[in-house]
Amino acid sequence: MSTTYSARNSTWRNWGGNVSARPAREVTPASVEELAAAVRRAAEDGLKVKAVGTGHSFTSIAATDGVLIRPQLLTGIRGIDREAMTVTVEAGTPLKRLNAALSREGLSLTNMGDIMEQTVSGATSTGTHGTGRESASIAAQIKGLELVTADGSVLTCSDKENPEVFAAARIGLGALGVVTAITFAVEPLFLLTAREEPMPFDRVVAEFDQLWAENEHFEFYWFPHTGNTNTKRNNRSAGPEQPVGRLAGWFEDEFLSNGVFQVAQWVGRAAPATVPAIARISSRALSARTYTDIPYEVFTSPRRVRFVEMEYAVPRAALADTLRELKTMVDRSGLRVSFPVEVRTAPADDITLSTASGRDSAYIAVHMFRGTPYQAYFTAAERIFTAHEGRPHWGKVHTRDAAYFSGVYPRFAEFTALRDRLDPERLFQNDYLRRILGA
């Protein structure tokens, strides 16, 4: 099997449909050596290089008019070390394949985001996270990384080997090189009991600290134009396994959360005046339920309704104020917001440009249905988030630049200095990186 080159100049689009690019050529390497050769050849030809996963970022972080590297042949598990309790996987492996493979081996990641369509390298490079009191983002579970740097060499790093690269490259934004393999910490497969129940907005916000402290993983969705939320608490369980029944699962997760929700979004887009009424019905559609299953069946859920998203991490202590300001803004604005607002948390970590770097964080994600004008809502929300020193998710819509980031990330200069060392000619540069990291 060898690298396939394509120079037909086709258009690449992201999942949300809000970003497109026309690379000069696409490369699908079948090995690390072929990827390294493609990087060297791009440099010789004066072309920039970007690797792209499944396109689940809403920013143009993967867009390029140079060489687009697609990692779909770099997939699978390289090895499991049961003594060290780690798994090493190729960078293009989709999270859902990793989760299923680990489960067959009686293993699991500690925590994960709420979708598993992304590749492992795409998810970690942009800081994908779930929710957790003690357990942090997917990148925080990385024990080792392999990446091809700008000169075509293969660099491995961990907290023992090239530790300064490891500190930054776990969430490297595609700016330091092309990740080719990741070693994750794993643990024996465990069970989670999920308890989902509606709760009034005012109560969730007032009792948030207690709900956070009492649960290993707490999150909730607030439905704009209503005082209603749907909460979810995930905690480890001794069992027995009691998954959601097939019919109930189809009804709640497919019919209501995807099918009916999709129709409601179409109606709301066509007739914005109906949105508040739809929100009131949507917020009451999902009833309380409790189930116990293996981690990826509890943490993740299908997302078939396409949307555009902005998400900011604010200091956890600022969550209640930020949310109340967001609700007041929506109530007074005349905006019609048909998508729920998602709220999650993460503990502080030690990754240079992690949204939770050095501070306990709460995440607030705002969404709009794909094809609906989102700028007014996102602009107003962003004004609130940035007033609380918010840090935007690297893969979601935002308007911040390097000047802003140098103020909210104490170790920002550490990252840019490492980039100067690893990619002095800016082979991995694109417009997005130029904006967020500076020239």
Image (spheres, rainbow, N blue to C red):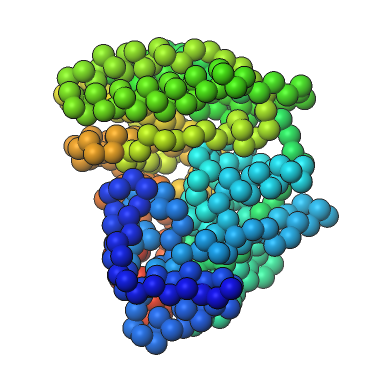
Q: Front-most of 416 and 295?
A: 295
Q: Residue at the spot x=76%, y=21% of the render?
A: 240
Q: Residue at the spot x=49%, y=20% of the render?
A: 252
Mark yes or no: residue 208 visible.
no
Dividing the image into 4 quarters, which one contains the N terminus?
Answer: bottom right
- In which quarter of the view is residue 385 placed? top left
**Which residue reaches farthest bottom?**
44
| Image x and y of residue 50, in percent | 40, 68
Side of 19 where 287 appears, left or right: right
Side of 180 where 417 appears, left or right: left
The answer to whether 316 is drawn above or below residue 235 in the figure is below
Q: Residue at the spot x=50%, y=46% of the render?
A: 117
Mark yes or no: residue 429 visible.
yes
| Image x and y of residue 262, in percent | 34, 28
Q: Residue at the spot x=60%, y=22% of the render?
A: 246
Dividing the image into 4 quarters, which one contains the C terminus?
Answer: bottom left
Question: How many numbered badges does the structure rendering display?
Answer: 0
| Image x and y of residue 207, in percent | 49, 18
- In which quarter of the view is residue 404 placed? bottom left
The answer to whether 400 is drawn above or below residue 49 in the figure is above
